[in-house]
């Protein structure tokens, strides 16, 4: 489509100064022209792409020998050597379809659009089709079914990646961080899947260019944008009176596109233990509005803007205290974000992206005694973040690409449990070099520096490489450093429990608070030297991933990924002082070191276009190093719950960190028959037993009574597409009605649901 | 009770007779025996059957020397060594009593502590007892713990005390609930069926000869 317009020095290759051209046509094996095939002249930095007729041309070619390389998504790369001597050359070339499955374009690993199978960092993707086939509603529904991802319910549905908790995972929407965590957990239930085009998941340190929290991994949600003109509506109704309505509308003209999305989700919740007053999960409803506007100023300059608004209301009702008084009330969450982005291709080599992101997250909750109307608890929390960023991608040539950027985040928080409005500022720089010294070798190295107002500067380097050992076997390796900044709570929390009388202070305020309590005579003893709190460090990780990937044929593929994450300076709660009321003062210190290691394996088999089967498995070990050394020294004890006898715990009895299953697995089958319009899916998820809480007083996981039994859930769905417009779907989640009311309150029983979807889309771009 | 029986069986009493070089007096070395005190009331708010009872807000005073409860009327004497009220434990010394009582909490297995430490003892102060409660001898599981709101003695904690008379003793607290129930059961987890609190079960070894030896005692025959 575009031809490099600048002249080459005529003395290239030191040969004659005759000027010729090389032109040609690229087709697939059936002879149909292929559009947008990348054609490069090796050894020079000239490159072009085929036009709508599959044609390309290089002009101003001096005589000499040339190697042309052709590449396109879904096709094997092909090279052609030709000699230009006395006349211009014209060629026809057929590209062979790649036996590797069509690999999606991903952005998360390198911050630029890349074909997933080409880059040295593993990026798992979930596309819109898969989301629709499973009938998922919220982000946690679909992520729970992916290998190596576990949903942990603690102050919301959080994501555990490679054995690391939600605190260590960064959730992005279109590359920008989602804020609003409760006790470290980012509740995935806040996010509807209705407008998701693709979910990209990077595990481990391959994503360190995103800064804090991108330590266990990054989940990046790419939302839909206008690709035509039309609209869709989907209504789902299911058990527990769960209703989900999603509406989409889009308009696209030559230069602009507008995409609008609205979702309403509501449920009555459920009650697993009828004999206890109040429900296990109270009723709630949420609304999401999203929009994306694109405008192309020219083929070189594009502008887009995303906006999002979210609100959720949850009712509460429970009994409390010795008198068992009823407390009622409601909590509300509101969130909005705006994200304009301007990209400008200065020339074929330099692309600039300027982006801005602003977001706020607010919660309010008011609980009152039903009989007296007296306030039981009133809390509010507000967080906001603003972030401008400039990124440049410099395409030196097909073998050398440099990316760099600079940005600043400004964050503020105000809450009932903080003394005053607190804010952070963080300026960061990042750089990345993608080097392809050989066709089968890709080395990507990068680093990021974060200069933060509240803690020490952080440098997070990473290096990744991919080597194609054989046409059907590749190796990918990533090593990197990540970090997690102390959060607002760990720095500034100022909370005294009025009933129990204990206090919790952030490390940034504890010294002043304890000293003031001392002068008031409220402290009997200081147990931890207050000087230690002056220098709370970020938690940091050093991680390794090594992956073997094979594509044995077009139907079989498999991969094994070995991983290890070493986290140091883990921030833990410590007892600072004892108060005269016998209660303690708590704060936060860098204390523990933990590691998680294991492997995950995926295998997929697609015997026909209509059928895809896959199996995934993760083996995980996650342990605390201090506990291990204490076990080695024989310093950990337990009491037999029956005989009350105290014994020394041996290393082999240690079960590692709580809430981690050693084995997790999934088996999935997706069927979609295009001709008849029938589709079906069956997904089985298993997690082995996992530690719940200490029960024998030693704080570690060591006896059988401290585990929750392993379990499997089976989800299934069936779809029928009727004509061009309507599709209906019905499903059953948790088919065998697995429940554990005592310990797993986040797991409702069997759920039935049905969906009707209407989809109207004009193929003609300009007419609605 | 089960524990009590096994302990009695396990600790066999042995008498050793050692001939001395200088004279014919023989020294009898006797192995010290752990005494078990079961369900000692510490100002309970309910009876063993779960019915409510009026609290006294007083410490239950205990003599390790005589292995018996001392009436509160003797609180100003050195007859008692240790006192219990709810989760608070006092020793007879400092601000708590007229004796020489001091204490410290050591980490390790009760049987393996063969000698009382020479130093590290503290006296009771008003509001700050030598035997620290939370993070000292017990963990409180709290509203979100498992089981909820339970006082669980920390395993591997042995309390060493100097008694009112300045003798040494070691104590291991085994349970805070009536009947020393298994705290991992559903029955214990449910507050409605949990056995009443403020009933201590503990075991101790008292060294009457004033030495720091906590294994055996020797006396001239």
Image: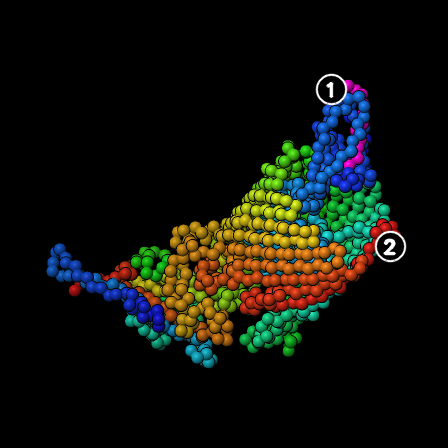
Sequence-earlier tag: 2 or 1: 1
Q: Chain of mark 2?
A: A
- In the rendering, at what x and y percent does residue A283 appear? 67, 69
Query: Is residue A61 located in the magenta-colored stretch of the structure?
Result: no
Same subunit under labels 2 and 1? yes
Query: Which numbered disc covers residue A768?
Result: 2
- Residue B165's x, y, as percent? 29, 66
Query: Residue A204: horizontal and vertical position, in percent?
Result: 59, 47
User: Is residue A211 positioned above or below A67 on the image?
Assistant: below
Name the quadrant containing residue A270. bottom right
Seen from the viewer's position, the closer of residues A625 and B34 is A625
Which residue is pictured at 61% across the width and 44% down the height? A552
The residue tagged with tag 2: helix, strand or loop? Answer: loop
Left or right: A23 as drawn, with respect to A192: right
- Determine the image quadrant of residue A187: bottom right
The secondary element bearing badge 1 is classed as helix
- Residue drawn 73% across and 38% down? A95
Give the residue at mark 1: A14
């Amino acid at each position: 489509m575009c031809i490099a317009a600048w002249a080459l020095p005529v003395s290239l290759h030191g040969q004659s100064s005759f000027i010729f051209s090389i032109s040609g046509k690229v087709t697939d094996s059936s002879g149909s022209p292929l559009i947008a095939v990348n054609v490069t002249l090796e050894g020079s930095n000239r490159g072009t792409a085929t036009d709508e007729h599959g044609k390309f041309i290089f002009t101003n070619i001096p005589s000499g020998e040339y190697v042309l390389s052709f590449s396109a998504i879904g096709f094997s790369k092909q090279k052609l050597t030709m000699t230009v001597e006395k006349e211009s050359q014209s060629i026809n070339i057929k590209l062979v379809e790649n036996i590797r499955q069509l690999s999606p374009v991903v952005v998360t690993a390198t911050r630029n659009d890349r074909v997933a199978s080409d880059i040295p960092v593993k990026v798992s993707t979930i596309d819109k089709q898969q989301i629709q086939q499973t009938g998922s509603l919220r982000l946690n529904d679909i992520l729970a079914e992916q290998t190596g991802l576990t949903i942990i319910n603690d102050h919301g549905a959080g994501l555990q990646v490679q054995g690391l908790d939600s605190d260590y995972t960064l959730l992005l929407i279109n590359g920008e961080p989602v804020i609003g965590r409760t006790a470290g957990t980012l509740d995935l239930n806040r996010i509807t899947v209705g407008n998701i085009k693709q979910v990209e998941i990077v595990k481990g340190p391959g994503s360190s260019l995103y800064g804090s929290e991108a330590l266990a991994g990054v989940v990046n949600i790419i939302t839909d944008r206008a690709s035509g003109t039309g609209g869709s509506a989907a209504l789902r109704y299911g058990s527990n009176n769960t209703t989900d309505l999603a509406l989409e509308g889009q308009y696209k003209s030559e230069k602009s596109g507008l995409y609008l999305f609205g979702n309403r989700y509501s449920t009555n919740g459920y009650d697993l233990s009828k004999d206890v007053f109040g429900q296990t999960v109270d009723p709630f409803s949420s609304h999401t509005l999203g929009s994306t506007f694109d405008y192309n100023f020219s083929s070189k300059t594009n502008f887009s803007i995303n906006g999002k608004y979210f609100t959720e209301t949850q009712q509460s009702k429970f009994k409390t205290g010795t008198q068992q008084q009823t407390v009622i009330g409601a909590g509300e969450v509101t969130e909005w974000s705006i994200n304009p982005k301007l990209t400008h291709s200065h020339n074929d080599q330099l692309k600039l992206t300027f982006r801005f992101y602003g977001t706020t997250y607010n919660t309010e909750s008011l609980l009152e005694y039903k009989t007296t109307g007296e306030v039981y608890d009133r809390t509010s929390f507000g967080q906001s973040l603003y972030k401008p960023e400039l990124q440049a991608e410099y395409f030196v040539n097909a073998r050398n690409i440099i990316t760099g950027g600079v940005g600043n985040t400004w964050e503020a928080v105000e809450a009932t449990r903080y003394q005053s409005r607190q804010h952070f500022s963080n300026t960061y720089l990042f750089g990345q070099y993608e080097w392809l010294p050989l066709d089968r070798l890709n080395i990507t190295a990068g680093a990021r520096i974060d200069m933060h107002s509240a803690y020490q500067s952080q440098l997070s380097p990473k290096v990744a490489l991919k080597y194609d050992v054989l046409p059907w076997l590749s190796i990918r390796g990533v090593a990197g450093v990540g970090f997690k900044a102390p959060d607002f709570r760990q720095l500034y929390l100022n909370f005294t429990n009025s009933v129990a009388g204990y206090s919790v202070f952030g490390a940034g305020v504890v010294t002043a608070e304890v000293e003031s309590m001392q002068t008031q005579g409220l402290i009997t003893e200081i147990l931890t030297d207050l000087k230690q709190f002056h220098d709370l460090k970020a938690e940091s990780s050093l991680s390794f991933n090594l992956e073997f990937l094979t594509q044995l044929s077009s139907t079989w593929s498999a991969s094994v990924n070995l991983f290890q994450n070493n986290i140091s300076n883990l921030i833990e709660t410590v007892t600072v002082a004892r108060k005269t009321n016998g209660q303690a003062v708590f704060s936060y210190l860098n204390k523990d070191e933990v590691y998680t290691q294991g492997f995950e394996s995926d295998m997929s088999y697609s015997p026909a276009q209509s059928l895809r089967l896959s199996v995934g498995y993760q083996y995980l070990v996650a342990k605390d190093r201090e506990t291990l050394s204490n076990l080695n020294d024989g310093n950990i004890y337990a009491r037999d719950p029956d005989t009350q006898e105290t014994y020394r715990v041996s290393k082999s009895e240690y079960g590692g960190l709580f809430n981690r299953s050693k084995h997790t697995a999934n088996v999935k089958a997706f069927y979609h028959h295009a001709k008849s319009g029938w589709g079906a899916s069956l997904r089985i998820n298993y997690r082995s037993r996992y530690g719940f809480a200490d029960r024998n007083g030693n704080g570690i996981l060591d006896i059988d009574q401290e585990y929750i039994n392993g379990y499997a859930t089976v989800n299934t769905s069936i779809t029928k597409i009727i004509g061009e417009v309507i599709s209906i779907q019905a499903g059953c989640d948790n088919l065998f009605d697995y429940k554990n009311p005592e310990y797993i309150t986040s797991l409702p029983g069997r759920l039935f649901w049905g969906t009707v979807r209407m989809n109207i889309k004009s193929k003609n771009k300009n007419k609605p | 009770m089960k524990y009590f029986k096994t302990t009695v069986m396990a600790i066999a009493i042995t008498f050793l007779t050692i001939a001395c070089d200088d004279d014919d007096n023989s020294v009898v070395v006797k192995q010290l025996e752990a005494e078990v005190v079961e369900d000692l009331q510490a100002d309970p708010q309910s009876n063993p059957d779960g019915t409510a009872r009026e609290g006294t807000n007083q410490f239950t005073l205990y003599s390790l020397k005589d292995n018996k409860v001392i009436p509160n009327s003797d609180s100003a004497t050195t007859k008692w060594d240790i006192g219990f009220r709810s989760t608070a434990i006092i020793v007879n010394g400092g601000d708590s009593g007229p004796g020489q009582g001091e204490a410290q909490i050591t980490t390790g297995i009760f049987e393996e502590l063969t000698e009382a430490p020479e130093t590290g003892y503290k006296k009771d102060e008003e509001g700050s007892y030598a035997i620290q409660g939370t993070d000292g001898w017990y963990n409180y599981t709290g509203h979100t713990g498992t089981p909820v709101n339970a006082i669980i003695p920390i395993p591997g904690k042995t309390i060493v005390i100097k008694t009112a008379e300045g003798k040494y003793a070691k104590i291991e607290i085994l349970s805070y609930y009536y009947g020393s129930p298994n705290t991992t059961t559903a029955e214990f987890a449910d507050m409605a069926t949990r056995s009443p609190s403020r009933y201590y079960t503990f075991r101790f070894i008292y060294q009457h000869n004033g030495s720091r030896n906590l294994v055996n005692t020797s006396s001239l025959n």
